[in-house]
């Protein structure tokens, strides 16, 4: 399925922006109801809504988009502002979490790199010292150190190469959703 086929599933604004439609009976249905006493701005968005918005934003790629909330009940200006702020703060929060995951991945990658380089230097040093020694056990230790160094270096590189791009994409996606234009169309 090509990009045009995917985008054809969505309505467009007059400006050519993709419209991510969200329908719900009322504003309260947009929020998780595990904490009934928290103000909307501090409550988590409903999990299915979050997954839906993330999936839609991934699917449309780099196309500009707006989020259109279509509610069965009329929505006043104050509630609209609360929903907009809730979406902004929630996806900013997810962006921050992804940033922390990326920092942890980088720390782990650099740690493994440091260990690998240290073991590699130790391996080279042991190999030089034992090059004239005929003891098989010492030669096995030298070879084992070399293998351990390369495993650590490989793990460092693989961690970085495999996790960097998905983490970066998720951060950009959450950023785009946190800054998305939101419109409302309450039914009467």
Image (cartoon, rainbow, N blue to C red):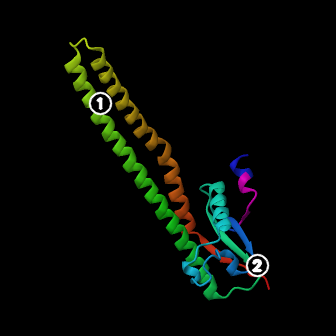
Residue 16 visible to an observer of this rendering: no
The residue located at (64%, 67%) in the rendering is 47
Q: Give the range drawn in magenta.
A: 6-12
Q: In this view, does 135 lie above or below 33?
A: above
Residue 180 % position (x, y): 58, 69
Category of crowding for the residue at label 2, using alpha-carbon neighbours closer than 10 angstroms: few (below 14), some (14–19), many (at least 20): some
Lower position in the chain sequence, tag 2 or tag 1: 2
Query: Which residue is nearer to you in this view: 34 or 11?
Result: 34
Report the mark closest to the observer, 2 or 1: 1
List the residue tagged with mark 1.
Answer: 120
The residue located at (63%, 66%) in the rendering is 50
Residue 101 % position (x, y): 46, 56
Which quarter of the rendered picture does the C terminus lie within?
bottom right
**How far apart, in angstroms, are the residues tagged by discs 2 and 1?**
63 Å
Residue 184 % position (x, y): 69, 78
The residue located at (62%, 61%) in the rendering is 54
List the residue tagged with mark 2.
Answer: 25
Secondary structure under the numbered disc 1 in the rendered image: helix
């Amino acid at each position: 399925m090509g990009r045009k086929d995917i985008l054809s599933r969505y309505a467009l604004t007059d400006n050519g922006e993709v419209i991510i439609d969200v329908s719900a009976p009322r504003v309260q249905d947009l929020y998780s109801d595990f904490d009934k006493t928290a103000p909307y701005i501090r409550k988590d968005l409903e999990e299915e809504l979050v997954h839906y918005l993330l999936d839609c934003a991934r699917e449309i790629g780099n196309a500009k988009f707006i989020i259109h909330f279509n509610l069965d009940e009329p929505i006043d200006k104050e509630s609209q502002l609360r929903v907009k702020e809730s979406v902004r703060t929630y996806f900013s929060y997810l962006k921050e979490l992804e940033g922390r995951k990326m920092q942890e991945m980088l720390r782990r990658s650099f740690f493994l790199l440091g260990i690998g380089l240290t073991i590699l230097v130790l391996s080279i040093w042991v190999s030089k010292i034992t090059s004239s020694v005929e003891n098989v056990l010492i030669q096995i230790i030298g070879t084992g150190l070399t293998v351990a160094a390369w495993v650590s270096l490989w793990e460092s590189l693989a961690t970085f190469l495999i996790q960097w791009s998905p983490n970066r994409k998720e951060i950009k996606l959450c950023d785009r959703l946190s800054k998305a234009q939101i419109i409302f169309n309450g039914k009467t």
